[in-house]
Image: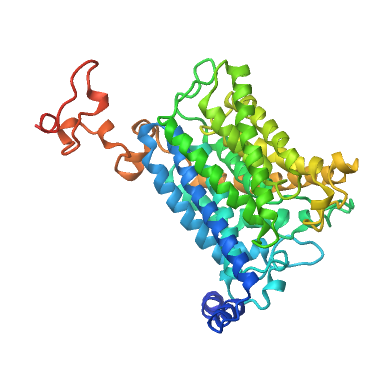
Amino acid sequence: MRRSSLAGALMLSVLAALIVPAVSMADTLEASLNGQFPESRAINTMWVMVAALLVMLMQVGFMFLEIGFSRGKNAGTIVAKILTNFSIAGIMFWACGFALAFGAPVSDSFNVAGKEGFFLQGFGDPATAFPVLGIFDVTVETKFFFQFVFCAVSLAIVWGSTLERIKFGVYIIYGIVFAGLIYPLGAHWVFGGGFLQNGDYLGLGLVGMQDFAGSTAVHLIGATGALAALLLLGPRKGKYGPDGKPRAIPGHNMPLFGLSVLILWFGWFGFNGGTALSGLDGRYPEIILITNLAAGSGVLGALLMSKIKMGTLDIGMAGNGAIGALVAITAPSGYVEAWTAPIIGGIAGLLVPICVIAIDKKVDDPVGVLTAHGICGIWGTLACGLFTAPRLAQYNAFGDPNGGLFYSGSFDQLLAQVVGLLIAFSFVFLMSYGTFWLIKKTYGLRVTEAEEDAGLDISEHGMYGYPEQFIPSAELVGYGAAPAASAKAGAPIATTKEATA
């Protein structure tokens, strides 16, 4: 009886949350209908929503990047994975993620989670319901969508390390936990008004951690989840030889990879520039300039180091140099002067080949997630402690107003960055490792060896991303060519009629 009563109460609570309209939504609609929507709010809302759509476009970048670095037999499954995870993130962040990440704190004394805005319903004044976002003159719906696409990016980062051997169902299970709990709590602590951002913890008298757009809150959190998965998943078949040395497993499409880098680069202008959450104060053009300077320096730094380390100007390293630099500039982009951007981005680019080669000796990370989003995310977060300018420190009310080490001569901000990094990494790693361990013991993490050999396209989805490469010519009605795998060297390519005869 008690169980049924409790279940009934929970159902009624959920229904009430869904049925009762949010005050902010009603006010927004009424103001719009009456022509009372403030011009400043309209401009800010339009800019932030455009920025959010640019960030959403980054999902295409992640999809093409992973397809390009995969073998042809695993190209199609990545499309399904991106669509599925974006959908899961959208629903879970609406249901509980946004409230946990940006809602008014459960406890003022130790701010670990928000409590307002579940299902984006049932809250009063938005300025008090979402205090860290309350100072921005943007509609709640816009703030929600902008933060949701950040969550979706962080979730997408996790899976680049697991390509070509993970069960599809793992995406769904972990995606629910990540978007509903792990990411929201980590993001709340770092840039949602939580204890790491305000510095009021441990009794050490620390200033608040700075992370403008998410080098830690988005990128390192995603990379940490990837590390936890990799340790339990293991390498792809054939990645390491009998001597334990890594073997190259080349991706099948470098032009697609190049397109992905440019799409991500473009989306990052919304990622960093939109985080100003204003189209009126003029900060976002400077932030976009800083972002672009860092990315270009990252490409050049990676090319230089790949030539030194590998003797070649490696295409993959150049692309990851851009991505690593963009990750690195994400945290400091709103707090640093333009002259620091080439330094921050250039160092990230130099780190990419060094770290990719070193990590590849121990774990199989096909697209370089641990380097581009992990190592470079750490570097970008630490860069705030070095380069934050006093004139811009005011935009993080809890940071050191005197700026970073190179301006103030003080280690206060750098210490806050180090402590914040360690706490955020430890939390996400323990939660992710525990979740993947439970999945491994119950549902399972990895496809069978036979399924891995066949490719995830056919074993998980019953179809091929590139059918003409794998299906016998007699079955390829209408394709106009024999499969490349069956064509003999120097033999003429069969016509459609010959192939289907």
In the figure, 230 relative to 171: above or below?
above
Judging from the image, the colouring scheme is rainbow
In this orientation, does residue 180 appear?
A: no
In the figure, 465 relative to 401: above or below?
above
Q: Position of residue 481 (x, y in %)?
A: 20, 30
| Quarter of the image that includes the C terminus | top left
Q: Position of residue 289 (x, y in %)?
A: 65, 45
As drawn, the residue found furthest toward the left would be 501
| Closest to the observer, 61 or 182 | 61
In this orientation, does residue 161 appear?
A: yes
Residue shown at 66% from the left, 38% from the top? 294
In the figure, 16 relative to 348: above or below?
below
Q: Position of residue 427 (x, y in %)?
A: 69, 48
Q: With 320 as the anchor, is 132 left or right in this view?
A: right
Q: With 199 as the anchor, is 431 left or right in this view?
A: left
Q: Position of residue 386 (x, y in %)?
A: 81, 40
Residue shown at 63% from the left, 33% from the top? 298
Q: Which image quadrant is residue 158 in?
A: top right
| Closest to the observer, 193 or 266 | 266
